[in-house]
Image (cartoon, helix red, strand yellow):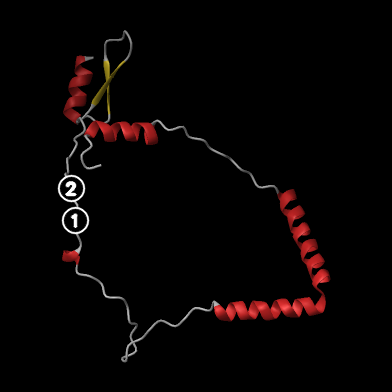
Amino acid sequence: LRSKDEKFWKDLLDTWVVGAPVGEIVMRPSKALVKARAAQETKGVELRRAALGKKGLKTCKVSLEAALAANAPKALPTRADGSIALAPVPAASSIPTLPVTVRMLTMPRSLTLRSAGAGEGVGVGVPQTASASASASASA
């Protein structure tokens, strides 16, 4: 990839970023659907409780407690002084770097838009100074 020229990268960006098709999905919440799903969830929980019975619920509770205990966060390793023992961090000088070329692009101070057939340009982008405004109004 380092051997690819600038045209390759511009074409790549144009194909996959700038010129890529874009879609948008607009979703609006439904209060009626929220209420219906909440009622359905409540009914489902009641049906599962009835199907499990008291014995099944106790079994589920024991399984849940065992899973919580097995997955409880472990204490971080500490040193004798009570501080947390972290992994060693390498020196910044030991991290390899990639060669980088920097180019500064400059924008023109103003752009001129020309309407078809009008022959006069309209300055865009940079506000005119007082002297430039005065000379522009004097010439008009």
Which residue occupies the foreground of this view, 91 or 4?
4
Q: Dot 1: few (<14), some (14–19), or many (≥20) neighbours within 10 Å?
A: few
In the displayed structure, 29 sits above or below 118; it is: below
Q: Pointers 2 and 1 in contact (CB under 8 A)?
A: yes
- Rendered-image quadrant of the C terminus: top left
Residue at 78% from the left image edge and 58% from the top image edge: 39
**Helix, strand, or loop for circle 2?**
loop
In the displayed structure, 104 sits above or below 55; it is: above
Tell me which amino acid carries mark 1: Thr
Q: For residue 4, which quarter of the picture?
A: top left
In the displayed structure, 66 sits above or below 133; it is: below
- Rendered-image quadrant of the N terminus: top left
Residue at 79% from the left image edge and 71% from the top image edge: 49
Please indicate whether residue 54 sits to the left or right of residue 8 in the image. Answer: right
Tell me which amino acid carries mark 2: Val
The spot of residue 31 in percent (x, y) is: 71, 50
**Residue 126 in view, yes or no:** no
**Residue farthest to the bottom, as pictured:** 80
Residue corresponding to mark 1 = 97
Q: For residue 42, which quarter of the picture?
A: bottom right
How far apart are labels 2 and 1 at the CA level? 9 Å
Q: For residue 16, which quarter of the picture?
A: top left
**Helix, strand, or loop for circle 1?**
loop
Please tell me the numbered disc located at residue 100.
Answer: 2
The spot of residue 75 in percent (x, y) is: 44, 83
